[in-house]
Amino acid sequence: MSTILLCVTGSIAAYKAADLASKLKQAGHDVTAIMTEAAQQLVTPSTFLNLTGNRVYTDLWDPQGQTEHIALTDRAELVIVAPATANTLAKIAHGLADDMVSTTLLAVASPVLVCPAMNTRMWRHPTVQQNLDAVRTLPGYHVLEPSEGNLACGHVGPGRLPETPEILAAVDKLLGERRAAPKAPGTGKHQVPTAPGTGKHPIPTQAPSLFLELVTYDSPPSAEALTEDRVYRTTLLVAGTLVSTGALGSQRRAHVHVAKSMEEALERARRSPLAASGCRIEVFPWRLEAGLPPTTA
Ligand SMILES: Cc1cc2nc3c(=O)[nH]c(=O)nc-3n(C[C@H](O)[C@H](O)[C@H](O)COP(=O)(O)O)c2cc1C
């Protein structure tokens, strides 16, 4: 049904992520797990390999030199961080990218469901709460509050990873919102432009750190081309200036524009002569720190 990235971090609740992976797979989703080093101390990559049937990513430095963190996010329709440690929350809040999980999370353009789990005192710590507030305000990020109860450390209070059914319900809700997003005009073939990770329309256009890159293709790439093509070009534009490009593979990008709001991007899409001919139109959201040079995706 959907392509889901499951980021597992080093909480004692990491074993519950195995059940989540299993249930997602049973529901028909294509699940790929990414694990932090700490997560691997608590549960093995082999568990997720066997439950999902997909390679498990643990290392940013792929031996074949591929930028898997980008390729994975290109394919992902939803990213789940479960359980999310205080450490990983801090990384997300501050844009740190020093391992496969955190670097992948900086590159996502799909909704991200963050499910924190930690000791009650950690949860209540002001810095954790500040980081949570920051994560909650990130476009496309959704925080599933931990439940209260007995924790592995013997404490009682908030900090438990919600049970699998609750996480699955949140997943279904986010995927449902994404599917319900209106189709672009022209044909049903168009990829629906969505806010960075929210799957909602419209995105908050006043977001200072948001740029949108509208890409139209000369011809609709075939499904085979899209799945076989493991080499993606990332083209990053800021205010019309080409900042970086990479290898593209078989896709041809014909026209690239930069819009400063979703409305502008949609308007361009509607006016594009290619829209009526069934060509693929995508709007890529890029989150950039205002005034700072962009990170090459
Ligand atoms: C047995 C054990 C259980 C842990 N459980 C949690 C937890 O539930 N939540 C949390 O935030 N940190 C927990 N930690 C601490 C994290 O593993 C540690 O902060 C680590 O650096 C997190 O790295 P990561 O975010 O890259 O996975 C635990 C540590 C140990 C040794």
Image (cartoon, rainbow, N blue to C red):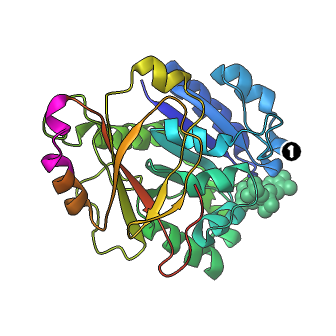
Residue 145, compared with residue 260, is above or below; it is above
Q: Position of residue 200 (x, y in %)?
A: 28, 52
Residue 167, compared with residue 120, is above or below; it is above
Quadrant hosting ligand 1: bottom right
User: Looking at the rendering, in which quadrant would you find the N terminus?
Assistant: top left
Q: Position of residue 75 (x, y in %)?
A: 50, 35
Question: Disc 1, ligand 1: is the CB inside 8 Å?
Answer: yes
Which quadrant would residue 41 be assigned to in this image? Answer: top right
Q: Residue at x 84, y 36 (%)?
A: 63
Q: Position of residue 143 (x, y in %)?
A: 48, 58
Q: Say which amino acid is labelled 1.
A: Gln
Residue 24 in view, yes or no: yes
Residue that badge 1 annotates: 41
Q: Residue at x 59, y 39 (%)?
A: 71
The stretch in magenta equals 269-277
Left or right position of 247 against 37 = left
User: Looking at the rendering, in which quadrant would you find the C terminus?
Assistant: bottom right
Residue 28 in view, yes or no: no
Q: Is residue 261 magenta?
A: no
Report the label total. 1
Q: Main secondary structure of the magenta part?
A: helix
Which quadrant would residue 208 be assigned to in this image? Answer: bottom left
Q: Position of residue 147 (x, y in %)?
A: 54, 55
